Image: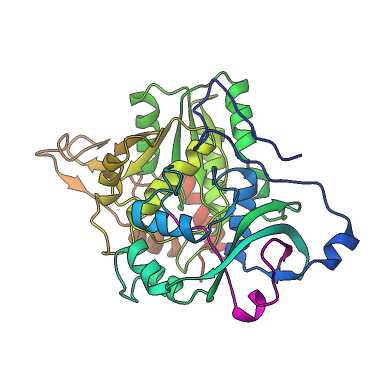
Amino acid sequence: MLKSFSFSNLVQPHGGKLVYRIIPLPAPEYLEKLPKINLNQNQLMDVEQIALGTFSPLEGFLGREDLESVLNTTRLKSGVIWPIPIVLDVSHKDAEPLKVGSEVALTDSGGQPFAILHLAEKYDFDKKELAEKLYGTLDEKHPGVKIAISLQPVFLAGKIDFFKRFDRESKKYELSPRQTRQIFRERGWSTVVGFHTRNVIHRGHEFIQLRALEQEACDGLLVHPVVGAKKPGDFHTKYIMQSYQKMMDSFYPKNKVILAAFNTYSRYAGPREAIFTALCRKNFGCSHFVVGRDHTGVGKFYDPHASQKIFDSFPDIGIKIVKLQAIYSKTRNTYIASPEEAMGDEIIDISGTQARTMLVRSEFPPAWYMRPEIAEDIIQAVKNGEEVFVK
């Protein structure tokens, strides 16, 4: 029932096998007898991605030894690279009646079971230690630190079985690692470059995507927007996916691009999160992954190049990191991939915040920054009174 899955012509999943922990719906009377833990939205997303194999080789939530190893070495105790703690935090009240070795029903906000945890361990952990080792700071202005400090006091560890995926607006785009690998295989692709984004497409990202595809001579490109929890000012998922669908329909090279959505949330972990985003795309079948300047950056907490440099310490990561920038040269009326190439040129830039302000005012950003066809759709939505940005 629980199987690993492999495609020999594609990059191997991280750790050597693609985890798959989806089971048929258990009998209602069986679920009724199990103790239950209610999960929040982020925990629910983690369970789903573990089950689908996105977090391979993880089969569940980390125990103490693995957590300590991840924080201290950026590797699991097995030695496999893993940068982010995937933990299930609960209250003392919820944890107290649970017995190690038992099964626990995991429920959504409505109290409906969607997964089973095979409880292998329950433990407490110093949250300040977790925050400092994960984020490199205890400054509570760092959003990750605030989240870590506010975690519940007990961590539950163990493998999970998942049996109920959830409907949501982006669901039709949410391909699993098994599905993307099957599509790549059917297209005869063995080299695929992945691109991580949280925004509507703009010309800088378009340049990086196509430059990476050409420069690395890859068979295809996986455009993979993150569609989970948002923060104020972010584009709502609907408009991100619409903008990329327009690119698919009208502008991307035909039969070279796959558009899919990745339902997860920001970890605010800077360079560590850059590794995490790469490993997830490796599990989706990508042999290459684009990491730009300030990839997964968090304000001024990390050097803008830290997320690129960190990969130099992990030569065994098993996915090629493509380090590119998008610098617009007014002199040449084109984008350039590195500061060295742009030496002596007049460089101009618009921040994402400036571009969003223009769109809210129904003003078109310059065509070198965003295709008018993309901007027009967003401006029309704003004029229609639609909530384009998260409040």
Whether residue 220 is situated above or below residue 106 in the rendered picture: above
Q: From this viewpoint, is residue 92 visible?
A: yes
The location of residue 36, given as percent across then percent down, is 74, 70
The location of residue 283, given as percent across then percent down, is 53, 38
Q: Which residues are magenta?
A: 84-110
Q: Quadrant of residue 32?
A: bottom right
The location of residue 53, given as percent across then percent down, is 60, 43
Residue 388 among those drawn in magenta: no
Q: How is the image coloured?
A: rainbow
- Please indicate whether residue 7 sits to the left or right of residue 294 in the image: right
Which quadrant of the rendered structure holds the N terminus? top right
User: Residue drawn at (35%, 42%), measured in percent from left and top?
Assistant: 291
Nearest to the observer: residue 126 or residue 148: 126
The location of residue 206, given as percent across then percent down, is 40, 38
- Please indicate whether residue 166 sits to the left or right of residue 215 in the image: right
- Please indicate whether residue 87 sits to the left or right of residue 159 in the image: left
Whether residue 310 is situated above or below residue 34 in the rendered picture: above
User: Residue drawn at (36%, 25%), measured in percent from left and top?
Assistant: 216
Q: Quadrant of residue 356?
A: bottom left
Nearest to the observer: residue 34 or residue 86: 34
Residue 104 among those drawn in magenta: yes
Whether residue 125 is situated above or below residue 177 in the rendered picture: below
User: Residue drawn at (34%, 50%), measured in percent from left and top?
Assistant: 295
User: Residue drawn at (46%, 44%), measured in percent from left and top?
Assistant: 78
